[in-house]
Image: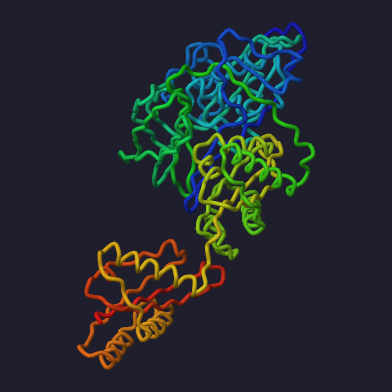
Amino acid sequence: MRRSGPRQTEATLCLVLLLIVGGAATARVAALPGAGRPGMLAQGQSPVEGPAAAKDPVLRFELPGEAAPAYRTDEMVPPRLAELAEEVHARWPGLSLTSNLSRAADAYVRATTVSRTNDLPPGLLEFVVRWAGCPEPPAVVSILSTTEDGTSDVLDHLGEILARAETAYTLLGVGRVASPRPPFKWRWALILSRRLVEMRPFPGQMEPGQQEVLRFQPAMPVSSGEIVVLRPGGSIVTVPVRRLGVSWAGAVQAGDQPGTLWVQLLVRGPAGQAMVGLLEVAVGQPRALVWTGQRIPDESDIDNAGAAEELMVELVNRDRRRFGLPELQADPMLAAVARAHSRDMVSEGYFGHVSPRFGPVAERLGRSGYRAAVARENISRAITIHESEASLMTSPGHRANLLAVDITRLGVGAVRDRGVGGHEQWVVTQVFAEPLAVLDGGSLRQVVDALIMDRRREAGATPLVASPLLEQWADRIAAAASLSGELDQGQLVAVQQELAVEHSGAPTVRAEMVGFSDPADCRLGDMLAQPELASYGLGIKVSNGTGEAPMSTVVILAATQ
């Protein structure tokens, strides 16, 4: 190709977080998108441009054309990109150039032509990708300026990105616009992502009350699938799914209110639970064409992990206050567990909730000696702490953890790492918990006594009378059962014999044993509902194991006299 002047290129690589998150215990997991939220403006309204865009804390980018009517993974390569798609496939057989991701790249490069891109939040790219109908979480976008009409510089630049990437990207989108900066002729956007799921087309717009079946097939071996939705109004619902061969299907209901419906596709694999798709659906209103948000806040003063962790705790509690929820108390023990997991992910080169060495969060808490009634965990990778929290809050699964009402404590662990292209990023673990309520024997006895009274009342039976003899035996039997895990039949015969001596008429003795670590899990059986019972004795033994939750063994002896 003839060149009219020196060949020049200029490139900017913008790292956008890819959150693949898994849950533990009662945790929801998962996650995307980034800082900004789509805003509805008039279609003809122009975004902030030029020097003002760098100064104004609020950014507005208008996308060209209507949003894709549906999310889909069966798109074809458009004819204008057929030649480039062949060149890409020839050099990188595992990489496919797709039409919807290329539409996203074209929109991104047009929307950001007059704005610097090195501090644009990831929410912009994620919004553009969803606008184009892509269900996959975006990974990176790179901006390249060239002086030539051909694509050789673009392919060379793509090769450099792939050579440095730790992620095996499988999807590519390419877009270009005339460059406003001489001597460059073209300004290109390359978006790289990874195909995590195949799915049937799902609408990007629904009406209140509408229901649509969502069927998806993960691109990796998994044991289960799940659909979690955040409906307009804030309610979070887990959709029942059916397994259909290698795919899953569930009926997604839009809810009764207009607004934004977030649909998250979750799967469970060897590394725990992971998010493989995130859909933003407009309910009772048009799809947004304009993104509004803020540039990445300056975190130059966050120069150590301690400061990053303090900032994350502050951001979590700020979000909880916005929804009228009490703040979480920073817990040093939880922070130590979270910090250890972030370090383990960095040193061992994985990103997930199940450590190959230390297991899921419940096991890690147990090893640390932390006794939790509820444990939840979020993990993220992002350039800044603000990006990390903003992305977690936009994800239905992570949002459920952050805004949970059954937790009071939080521990954050942040570790610096180098991501794609050598860019520094924070690897963050958030561990949420509700400490286990530990009751002494006297308090626990009051709780169980109240449960016995309630059980008799529900059955319409007369209250039982406490028997000192039965209580003495119940305490002995509970102590033995806490070690053996079962009732000693010899002791039961002995108490029957002793009671027969004390009372005429040979009363019958019945026994029930209950074991639990949390008093809230104490469930009494049907024995106490028997109307012929007249007296009872209650025995309790609390065993405190090192690094484990205390186990309470309760034995109830009840007699017909």
Vertical placement of 292 versus 273: above or below? above
Q: Can residue 271 be seen in this view?
A: no
Residue at horizontal 52 percent and vertical 11 percent from the top: 65
Q: How many numbered marks, from 0 up?
A: 0
- Residue 46 location, quadrant: top right
Nearer to us in this view, 174 or 41: 41
Q: How is the image coloured?
A: rainbow
Vertical placement of 496 versus 360: above or below? below
Residue 205, position as x, y percentages in the image: 42, 21
Which image quarter holds the C terminus? bottom left
Vertical placement of 553 versus 395: above or below? below
Residue 209, position as x, y percentages in the image: 35, 26
Nearer to us in this view, 151 or 173: 173
Which image quarter holds the N terminus? top right
Residue 53, position as x, y percentages in the image: 72, 17
- Residue 17 location, quadrant: top right
Residue 282, position as x, y percentages in the image: 46, 23
Q: Can residue 197 be seen in this view?
A: yes
Residue at horizontal 54 percent and vertical 56 percent from the top: 434
413 horizontally vs 466: left or right: right
Farthest left residue in view: 505
